Amino acid sequence: AQSVTQLGSHVSVSEGALVLLRCNYSSSVPPYLFWYVQYPNQGLQLLLKYTSAATLVKGINGFEAEFKKSETSFHLTKPSAHMSDAAEYFCAVSGPGSGYALNFGKGTSLLVTP
Amino acid sequence: DGGITQSPKYLFRKEGQNVTLSCEQNLNHDAMYWYRQDPGQGLRLIYYSQIVNDFQKGDIAEGYSVSREKKESFPLTVTSAQKNPTAFYLCASKEGPLGEQFFGPGTRLTVL
């Protein structure tokens, strides 16, 4: 079975500071990993995905994530936080089981303070 | 514009009633999914369908039912057997195994 664990249910950063959201995965096969963002009462939007190509993945809105097999991690970063980045962020993994459905972490709520 | 629509946005149900949540996509995707979201628990898979006239149970299918009679449509029925149905429900579709999974805007169901 494949799963992800997000460390920290709430993260607070100052505007302009580095954003780091942590995600560790567990998988017996090479995983497909994703980061999604959700604004209140809305659906999810894909930020970026890793599908075994480059280990450093660049996404939308200045976010990027690095796949580290040795650490089983896929942490999300952004060099400088904007107020508009405040949202819920989900890490997810998929594989051949369940029709390649996504298996989500519990989410990290990002707060950006002025 | 291509995308996924869900209706209604808000739904209220009395205990003992069945309700059906609509999900329509015009992305020509074969695979469709239903997830349930509860605060602090992330999203959990209810049902999925990889092709018309076929669907499979996900992790929390008890108390739910689906149909897939058309490629574009994947309605979810929340039955009276679902003991705690109050949640935010998200529908998604996907083109292939490595494709992006697109999400609808969600339906918030509240049991009165």
Image (tube, helix red, strand yellow):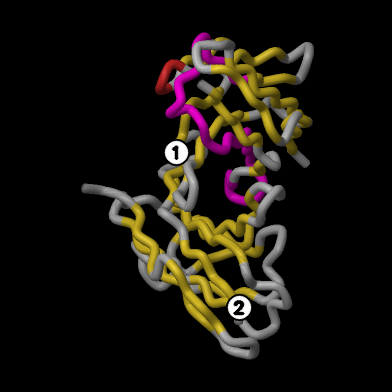
Asked if labels 1 and 2 touch by Cβ distance under 8 angstroms, the answer is no
What is the residue that sits farthest to the left in this orientation? B1
> Quick check: can you spot residue A24?
yes
Q: How would you rate the neighbour count of disc 1 (Cα within 10 Å): few for under 14, some for 14-19, many for 20 or more?
A: some
Residue A30 among magenta residues: no
What residue lies at 70% left-to-right and 73% top-to-bottom?
B84
Q: Tell me the number on the disc at residue B111.
A: 2
Identify whether B20 is placed above or below B92.
Answer: below
Q: Can you say whether A61 is above or below A70 in the image?
A: below
Residue projecting furthest to the front: A114
Q: Looking at the rendering, which quadrant does residue B111 occupy?
A: bottom right
Marking on residue A45: 1
What's the magenta region? A76-101
Residue shown at the point (64%, 72%) measured from the top left: B85
Under circle 1, the secondary element is strand
Q: Residue A108: give x, y in percent of width and height.
A: 65, 34
- The quadrant the N terminus of chain A occupies is top right
CA neighbours of label 2 inside 10 A, class few (<14), some (14 to 19), many (20+): some
